[in-house]
Amino acid sequence: MSLTVSIVIVSRHRPELLRRCLIGISQLDYDPFEIVIVADPATCTGLRSVPQAAFAKIIPFDQDNIAAARNAGIDASAGEVVAFIDDDSVPEPTWLKFLVAPFSHVDTAAAGGFVRGPNGISWQFQASTVDHTGRFAPVGVDPALATILIPTKNRAICTAGTNMAARRSVLEAMGGFDPRFKYHLDDVDFNLRLAAQELCTAIAPMAEVHNMRASNKFRRDDGAPIDLGEVGASWAVFLAKHCPPDLGKSAWERVQREERERACGHMVRGLLEPQDVGRLMSQLRKGYATGQNRGQVEGEIASISTRPFQPNPPRHDFRSIVLSGRFWQRTHLRNSARFEANAGSVVTLILLTPTALFHHVRFNPDGYWQHVGGIFGKSERTHRLISFKTFRRRVQFESHRVGKVRGLR
């Protein structure tokens, strides 16, 4: 029998994104799981009209603190495994199946999957490790198999907050997430705490989530930062908690260099003005000073869920299909895709033009996966710039490329 899973989604003032996420979750090929939504009161009220939230546990939460919100979700979770996803992300239909599979090994305490970025193709997060100064390094794993990794004394196994899971018993024993990390590094802190206890983390590359990095009070839709204050505060907490004292100064200098380089990169692309760089760096330093004054906070997770397991209705007739056509057929095909999605199918709609345009993938709010691009253009960004294929061969290629994660049989 499969492990029971609680999916925790934290959302704040982004009801449309949350609805899109819930539609994606409703198409998961896994049983049994429950949905726990932690959101601001207005969003919680609006969920009454969202069919995909009919069986969810809804937790009103009005603090601007993602770590504390996740802890509230854990408290209400009754699954043996607790999975986390952000409201601006959508999982592939096989996400839970691949993410939870490593927990069949008793040594697995946590697991993480891969995250695709806004274009639906490029990787935003893959396998990596992190040291006590917050320096990340990639790690090679088999892209088709889950790998259980043992942390070392100096390096932890990373999981992305929008695509990770842990045994509820482990989360309870560790007190959940540290609420001093209100916006940034709460997942990295959790990874280092797992490593300190020599607990294993599995990396499951096939457990894929698409993240669009939507705007919030700290960044815009195009990824440009608005305010780095909370980033600085989180780094102050992180370095004080994990970094050896003799390395703290150099680590903070490195963080400032990296943030300045990132801001300058946005400026070169025309997303920021020159004066914005100075303003952002000032915010970063002020935030760091604020974070140094955040005292120790003891986390606590209820040993028994505050509410019994509330399973989402199972999908006994999982069906994943492909619709394809030329871009000028898009109106008819999108109507067909919407109809099939409403009928309960997982739909992949491939719309191609006779060009070499790069491909993009996006989960449509109407409930289907839309792939657009040129017949001769590349999808995976490591592929050749131009690929000479017929329309039929290209559809077959793209269907095969996403076949395993999309549940195509």
Image: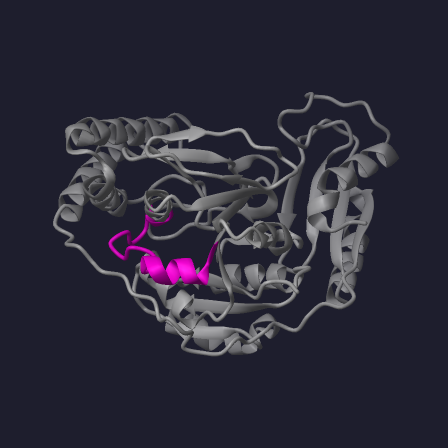
Q: Quadrant of the N terminus?
A: bottom right
Percent of width and height locating residue 198? 38, 43
Relative to 94, 186 lies left or right: left
Image point (18%, 32%), residue name: 248
Whether residue 30 appears in magenta in the rendering, the answer is no
- Depth check: give the residue in front, 372 or 135: 135
Q: Magenta stretch?
A: 166-187
Whether residue 184 appears in magenta in the rendering, the answer is yes
Scheme by which the image is coloured = one colour
- Depth check: give the residue in front, 165 or 348: 165
Relative to 96, 324 lies left or right: right
Percent of width and height locating residue 38? 42, 67
Residue 280, quarter of picture: top left
Residue 174, quarter of picture: bottom left
Residue 404, quarter of picture: top right
Percent of width and height locating residue 351? 76, 43
Q: How many marks?
A: 0
Percent of width and height locating residue 64? 30, 60
Relative to 233, 59 lies left or right: right
Image point (50%, 48%), residue name: 111
Image point (47%, 63%), residue name: 8
Q: Is residue 113 visible?
A: yes
Q: Is residue 14 visible?
A: no
Determine whether 328 is above or below 5 in the image.
above
